[in-house]
Image (tube, rainbow, N blue to C red):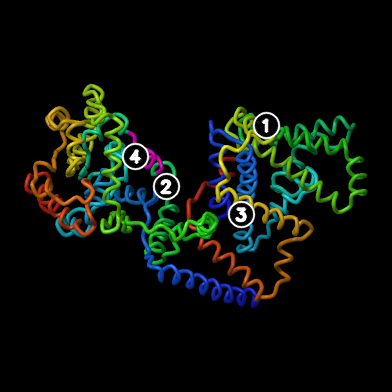
Amino acid sequence: MRRALTALAIALVLAGSALYAVERHWRARGYTPIIVDAPDLWALQRAKASSAGRAIVFLGASRTLYAIDRATVRARLPGVEPVMLAMDGRYPLATLRDLAGDADFRGIVVCDIDGAGFAAPSLDMQQPEVDYYHHEFSPSRALHRILLNHWQRHAVIARSDFSLLRSAVRRWNNEGEPFRPQQWFDRRRFGNIDYEFADREGQKRALRENLDRHGGHLPRVAFDAWWPQVEASHAWVRAIQVRGGDVVFYASPTSGLRRWVEEDWFPRKEYWDRMVAATPAKTLHALDVPALRDFPLPDESHIDYRQKPAYTNALIDALLERGLLAPGGG
Amino acid sequence: MLADSVFAPVVDPVFKAGASVDTAAAWTGTIAFAGQIFCDFAGYSTCAIGCAAMLGFWLPDNFRAPYAAVGFSDFWRRWHVSLSTWLRDYLYVPLGGNRGSRLFTLRNLMLTMLLGGLWHGAAWTFVAWGAFHGLMLVGERLSRPLLERAATMLGGFGTLLGGLMTLLGVLVAWVWFRAPDFAHAAKIHHAMFVATGSSAALTAEAKIALVVFGLLWLMHWLLRHHDLRRWLRQRNALSLGVIWAILAVAIVLSPGVSRAFIYFQF
């Protein structure tokens, strides 16, 4: 017993010292701890959407994921719990469908979606995470993720880029120092992008290349192939409304070439406006709100993290002024 | 840690249904799977043994340096000992074991391994895996006098050669165990034994997986005649503390994807 306790003490001292030295090494090179998004983090928030009582759930893709400031929502809408379920690069209808089928969900959904979001290929984009939540996420995974959040918040070495294996691969390939991400999350999954360092031109370049491939116009989706998803969403919206919740379909701001492409691809009059006329949901289009329409977008569709409070305030102002949200959010 | 971080990323692309596989990828994927399934299963078994020990129960080892086995009967004394013991006691012996003619014994061996394969899942690939092991056991039993004579002649080199031949057979069999279907298993076997030319250089991850498997094999070979528990009991507090510290640092510095325990499905 004494031998084991002595060995344990030696192991703790040695391991603690070694890990502290590694942590100091990376911090000295300018790395800071960040929380990394993962299916478990999404599932943890998805569970909160059901258990929080009155929640305001933000659905969408990266434009919402990196745009909403949680503290501002809390301050402006004290009656609701903000929950972030948007996903980078994936449209949100699958999650909306899931919330509609959840008898415990009675909250408000702000669903950031555009014409392409209702197209058939977009319908199941978030379904893998929904399936993960229902079939694989468990109390032990939840506990694991809560502990991991704490670890990632405080330790640079919690990130997989600093693992022994990644370090060995970098050394083998002469790759240099680990990647310095310009995106990070808080423990409740509200994301941030720092456009002082992030590639402002990358998105625009990709869009231009995509346009070039298609002769200057992205291929139109026939209205008849687009409309069934809109009709399907009616039932999901009503299911949430019947339980006392609500849904706001929200087209977030874009600028420059991105705005031109979206209008060219899914002209507002032919798609969005017809959806607005038929849906039982409330709707908001950023082009109708000067403060949102003219908001600075470094890459024509995303918000720099320093601008999140201002953007969130502008969005909440628009929702409240148009009666799309009750004062206080309740 | 090793199963999920080092081996699985090399295994999954090779065994994905429909994946195209060249010779280098077939071998690295198969070797990596041998590492993955051992580290995965032996790791969980050790956790269970440790948990039981904390409650005052001493469970037997489930793995005894299996990749250092010399011969397939030796392999099954070292791999998944709880299953192989169960198969022996509840299938092989009730079927008659070796209490009959030679043909009768060989039949019992084949039946036991076929059912042992089927125990892993209702798929023909598992039956093929069991059949392959059964055939190897039968072949070993039939050629035992020859093998014994060769071992006496070759000495230590013969043992090493026997160990490598056994490992080769075990690797070939793992392809059936991991492949999603017969066609893909056949494709990997073809790539393993008919040089297809390498379409792409091995990635650093694949090379690291091979190095780690090499170290794992070396460790098995060194521990071939030793009991790890007894060896650890003989260490003093300082060396034990250093070993634990190295393991703790390696675990903390291995964050990443957590994959499901392979044997959960069985």
The residue nearer to you, when weighing A200 against B77, is: A200
The residue that mark 3 highlights is B43
Look at label 4 and name its amino acid: Gln
Residue B106 visible here: yes
Of all chains, the one bearing label 4 is A
The residue that mark 1 highlights is B127
Of all chains, the one bearing label 2 is A
Q: Nearer the viewer, mark 1 or mark 4?
A: 4
Q: Are the residues flagged by discs 3 and 1 in contact, CB closer than 8 Å?
A: no
Is residue A126 shown in magenta? yes
Q: Are the residues flagged by discs 1 and 2 in contact, CB closer than 8 Å?
A: no
Q: Residues within 10 Å of mark 3 (few under 14, many from 20)?
A: some
The residue nearer to you, when weighing A110 against B96, is: A110
Marks 1/4 same chain = no
Look at label 3 and name its amino acid: Gly
The residue that mark 2 highlights is A137
Which span is picked out in magenta? A124-132
The residue that mark 4 highlights is A126
Q: Are the residues flagged by discs 3 and 4 in contact, CB closer than 8 Å?
A: no
Is residue A258 shown in magenta? no
